[in-house]
Amino acid sequence: MAGNQSIKTVKHVATVKRQFVVACALLLAAALITALLYTMRPDTEISEPVYVPITVDVVVAEKETIRIPMQAQGTVSPLQQTTLLAEVQGRIVAVSEAFNVGGFVNQGDVLLRIDPRDYQARLARAEAALRSAESEQLQERGRADVARREWEKLPAGSQRSDEARDLYLRKPQLAQVEAQLLAARADLQTAQNDLDRTIVRAPYRALIGAKHAEVGQFVTPGTQLAEVFSVELAEVRLPIPQTRLPYLDLPGVGSGKAGAAIDLYTDVNGDVTHWPATLHRSEGVFDERSRVLYVVARIDDPYGLTSPEPQPLRIGTFVTANIAGRPMPGLVALPRYVMRAGDNVAVVDDNNLVRNRTVTTLNTGGDFVYVSTGLENGDEVILTTLDSALTGAEVSVVSRVSSRELRQRNQADGRQATAGDIAGDAATAVPGEAPPA
């Protein structure tokens, strides 16, 4: 038993020695191969790093005389709106075929009729009373004439006071019958007016917005019959912030002269419709809460009844308005996204290096900003978005476009875009004016 144990121990020691020898051989072979590869390595070539400039697109500043329209929104409202009330009482006996909500009527058109029989009877009695008063006047004038002739025949000593003479000549009686005649004429006019009021007519060319009466209904004075509004003219109140008023050519206070042209449009599921309007007036009072001034645009014939319009501009429509601004010289139009913090833009200097340039812009909205100072003709403003850390880096200009061309391109796209795509103001250059140097 002890012999077997010693034999196992000898075998184990021999196995360990073999493994140690194999490991040493492998390590020696690896070291030899490593040394061989190191001695046969190729020589290393050291090269300088190549710097590739950043490629950018630039817009070349070009000063222009530009009109900067303001964009505002408002609701179309009628210039005139009237609630028709009954002036006499009675039962409605007839209505016009156009007496429906949405019906168009001309000035003087009959809308409805109230039973006139009672008022016809009153008119007949008033006419009879007038004839009676006229007869009394004629008789009294005859009596006065007879009394005057008798008075002239009396002896001079029998003539007493002036009061007695007037009484003898029947002057008080004549004045009384003349007063009765005037009252009869007034009663006749009142009866005629009441009879005329049984016919309700349109006060002007209008559209019926609501009706509150129908055939068979008994009405009294003050009963609402209908609501009508004018279709000859419409207006839109447009809020303009106080800071943007200098960009507009507003009508003078109390001036009847029309202001700038206005383009009104709506966008319904991508279908854009335009209507022309004019800036009629400003309300002259700032809103205390919002600090805006409301200007009023006026639209002629909004329903296109006398002129061919592609679509009527219905009362109550919510519209967007582009108001043409006054000409402002020496402006450079740039996309708003090129602006950096602190009213800076990135420009390319003469050495093709990125530099920050502080500019002054007008307080406007929209996709474009209008630079008034800080840029000169020919300055290259970087359109490519760059990190501010790259200020001073060298750049390579890939493409150039003038600010005028970029603005006109955006303006053309804006005309074809929907109202939802038009984010803000679109500027137009003044025709016939060259850009300032």
Image (cartoon, rainbow, N blue to C red):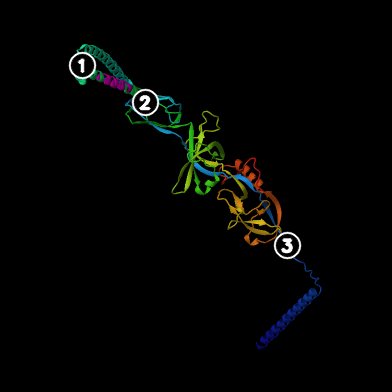
* Side of 270 where 109 appears, left or right: left
SS for callout 2: loop
For this rendering, which residue is in front, 96 or 88? 88
State which mark lies toward you, 3 or 1. 1
SS for callout 1: helix
Give the image location of residue 257, x and y in percent: 52, 37
Please say if the residues under marks 2 and 3 sit with CB atoms less than 8 Å apart: no
Q: Which is the main secondary structure of the residues drawn in magenta?
A: helix
Q: Which region of the structure is painted magenta?
A: 176-189
Q: Is residue 182 magenta?
A: yes
- What's the residue type where badge 3 is placed? Tyr
Give the image location of residue 289, x and y in percent: 44, 49
Residue that carries the numbered disc 2 in the rendered image: 215
Give the image location of residue 392, x and y in percent: 67, 61
Q: Residue 15's quadrant in the figure?
A: bottom right
Note whether residue 118 is visible: no
Residue that carries the numbered disc 1 in the rendered image: 168
Residue neighbourhood size for the residue with mark 3, other residues' Cα within 10 Å, grouped as few (<14), some (14–19), many (≥20): few
Residue that carries the numbered disc 3 in the rendered image: 51
